[in-house]
Every structure is written in structure tokens, then in C-alpha cells.
Image: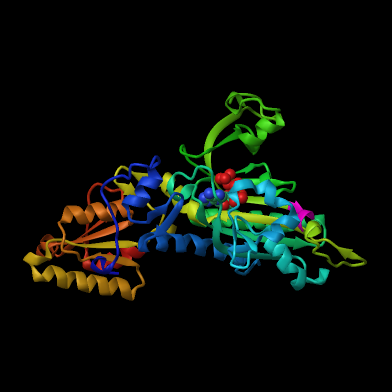
Amino acid sequence: MKASQLILGTQRENPADAEITSHQLMIRAGLIRQVSSGIYNWLPIGKKVLHKVENIIRNGMDSSGAQEILMPMVQPASLWEKSGRIDQYGQELLIFFDRHENKFCLGPTHEEIITDLCKNLLTSYKQLPVTLYQIQTKFRDEIRPRFGVMRSREFIMKDAYSFDLNKTGLDESYSLMREAYIEIFKDLGLDYRIVKADSGAIGGSDSEEFHVLADSGEDLLAFSDKSDYAINAELLTELQEGQDPLSLEGKPSPDGKGVLKLKKGIEVGHIFKLGTKYSEVLNLRIQGEDQDIYPEMGCYGIGASRIVAAAIEQNHDEKGIVWPESLAPFKVALVEVNSKNNQKVKEKCEEIYALLRENNVDTLWDDRDKRPGVKFADMEVIGIPLTIIIGERTIESGHIEIKKRQDEKPELVSHQDLLSIILS
Ligand code: ATP
Ligand code: MG
């Protein structure tokens, strides 16, 4: 892609309302632009990264055997009345009426819709176990949207729902999904932890959250220093009847092994065992081995758009974003320096750009008529892992300058070695 044709949208100034680094950098690197409180446009570079996140999630889900579907964002409020959640969800549920005065809501989650959908789709236990998922826009009228897409009102979630004949089946589907999440977060290249969690408004029994560790995280997590015990401090407070979680540091771990240490996390995924809560209330009955049963359900969310922000919280420096390879919008930035003075500079860029394209190296060729400093600053704030610099010096010396995002100085390489270095 040529930068002269790309809608870059980079900007130098931090937006006044951006309190945390990822929000500042997402605006400065031209990933997102605000439309209204908690509602954002995704610009080309941001969309590319979001697409990478979604594809990593999609691959993990498909490998686990889950099947992708797409449900509507607009949901009949009658289903929420039936499940009893219309009041429980409160004002986060955005309700509106169509021209015929039918009541609808914008989906903050899809337990009601999926359960209703399965009423006609699942008829016999022989079709189980089955897990269906979607990657789709959610709307929650958050009381205090903040931190850009980290806590927005409209956001992209992957939500999956499993259906099983009995509790043993549910345990297996839950474990399978947990394993799939572990693979997904490994592929995303993020430093994360799994903690025991509260089931909140969704309901159900067992539940665990996946957190990306970051000081800007809104959740406090408690870990034993001697075992795998890890819990969201919110739930620990509930279990310990209201003790201040900050007093929960240095205390003995509830599993009897070691003492608790506190860290902050950003919740990027959440898995729940729902049991028969929704299948019963929405009357999803299917033929069992001897008699009709209500399937045991599980639900599993990942915040795709929040992951983009969380990845930046974990991967940045004073110049901008430092993408993990898996999420970088481009692998290489090809920066053309002062080509007006020397026609050979452009020719060399064309040659290298063609070589990289032939080898499927996703490259952003900065062919804009701008000062080198502006180009370098843009490529650095966007966080492209490798920069190739082509200028008069390249033509004179015959060597190509290549710089890793966080290196101070470029390395000089020969034209012959360039490709193997990039592909290594
Ligand atoms: P939180 O505690 O952060 O409000 P939640 O527990 O309400 O989140 P879930 O219902 O578990 O969220 O949703 C699944 C995933 O969707 C979350 O793990 C999170 O990554 C993402 N998510 C939830 N709310 C938002 C939001 N307002 N903006 C962006 N992502 C969100
Ligand atoms: Mg949650």
C-alpha cells in the first residue's frame, strides 16, 4: 500500500479527553476517531488491526470445532421480558420502538436470541454437543464510557454459546473453550492471566475471566505467590463479605498456599457455565435419551475491539505503538527519503516494493511528499515492526538501511540479504 493513497489520519496532539496511553495512541496513530461518547469510527489502519484480532479469534474458535453464525444487533424486547433480564440489565440496555410501536433493544449480549434460535434448530440430543459463535457489534449504554474503545458503548465482541445434554458435557465444552482461549491469547502475543470471576448479570455458576495485565486496568486481581490460585478481587471481596480488596495484599491465599499479591488487569475474555437458566426460561426443550431435556448451556465472550486497546497498553514506548508481530497493521514501512533530489531513490523504492509484494510482505511505502522526520514519526507512532530507509545514501553506498521499531540506529544490509532478513 502506498501512503500517498492511504487515509492515514495520524495526528501530533493528544486528545484532551484521552486519559490512558492506548486511547491517546489510537487517536494519534489514526486507528480510531470519536463519533459520540463511547462510539467510534475505525480508520483503515485501525480496521486492519481489528481484522487481525478477529481472525486470530476466528481461527481459534474454528479449530475448537465451534461454528460461526451471525445474529442481529436489533433484538425484540419481548425475549428479554421472557428471560426476566429486561429489568435486571437496567439502563445499559438501549430500548426503542419501531414504527408499529413494537419494542426492541440493541443487543448487549445474545443469550436470549441464541436460545430462541436453537428452539427450531436443535431437536435431538444427537445433535449435541454444539457450540455456535459470532463476531459482532454489541451496544451497552455504559454509565461512564471511557478510555476510547476500552470501555465504549458500541464495541465488537466474539460471543459463543455451547449446548450439552448434561452437566458432564457442559464441563467438557467449557474446558474445550478454555483451551481455545489459551491458544487465542497465545497467538495474540499478550501477557494475560486467568482468574476466577463473578457471573454478574449473565448468571450461572462457574466463571473465569481472561485479563491482560496492565497498570491502567480497571480490575484488581489477586494471585497466590505459591500456587495457581488467581481471583478477581471483586469476587474475593464478596466471598470475604465486603473486606476492602486493597487489604487482600500479603494476606494468606484462600487455597492455603502462599500469600496474595495484587495486580491490575484489563478484562478481555469471560467464560461462564450458564446451566439451564436460559433453556428453561425460554423453553428450549430437546429430545433426550429417555425424555425431553433442557440443554446445559455455556457462554464465552472475547472483547475484540478492547483487545486492540489492551495490546497497546502492553506494547508501546514514548514514540508510539510497538505492535506484537501478530497484530501489526503492516510488517514493513518503506520510507522514501528526499526522492525529489534523486530520481534513483524512487526507482530503488519501486524495486524493493515489488520484491516485498512478490514475497507477500505487507508493506506500507511512504511515498508522500513530506519531510523525513514527519514520515519517521508517523511510522513510529503507528508501530510498524520494520522500517526500510531508502535515500541518496542508499544509492551512493549500495547498502540499504533497515531498522527495527525499537532500535536506535538502522543496520546496513546488502540488497541480496534484505529479503532473508525480513522473512527471518
Ligand atoms: P466489564 O466488567 O469490563 O464491564 P463485562 O463483564 O460486562 O465487562 P462481558 O459481559 O463478560 O463483559 O463481555 C465479554 C467481553 O466483552 C468482556 O470480557 C470485554 O472484553 C468486552 N466488553 C464488555 N464491555 C465492554 C465495553 N463497554 N467496551 C469494550 N469491550 C467490552
Ligand atoms: Mg465479564
Q: How many marks can you see?
A: 0
**Nearer the observer, 154 or 358:** 154
Left or right relative to 31: residue 396: left
Which residue: 26% across, 71% down? 353
* Left-right relation of 21 to 1: right
Q: Is residue 302 above or below residue 249?
A: below
Q: Is residue 189 visible?
A: no
Quick one: quadrant of the N terminus? bottom left
Which corner quadrant of the image does residue 415 belong to? bottom left
Residue 164 at x, y percent in the picture? 78, 61
Kindly indicate the quadrant of the structure image that contains residue 181. bottom right
- Would you say 286 lies left or right of 235 here? right
In the shown orientation, is residue 60 left or right of residue 283? left
The magenta stretch spans which residues? Answer: 274-278
Give residue 44's position: percent from left, percent from top.
36, 64
Q: Is 244 colored magenta in this rendering?
A: no
Quadrant that contains the C terminus: bottom left
The residue lying toward the viewer, choosing from 327 and 386, is: 327
- Residue name at image x 76 percent, y 72 percent: 120
Write the residue at 54% across / 50% down.
141
Is any atom of residue 84 visible in this view?
A: yes
Q: Residue furthest right?
A: 290
Q: Residue furthest front?
A: 100
Q: Measured from the top left, where is residue 121 in percent x and y?
A: 74, 72
Q: Position of residue 283 (x, y in %)?
A: 81, 62
- Quick check: 420 above or below 91? below
What's the colour scheme? rainbow
Foreground residue, 380 or 68?
68
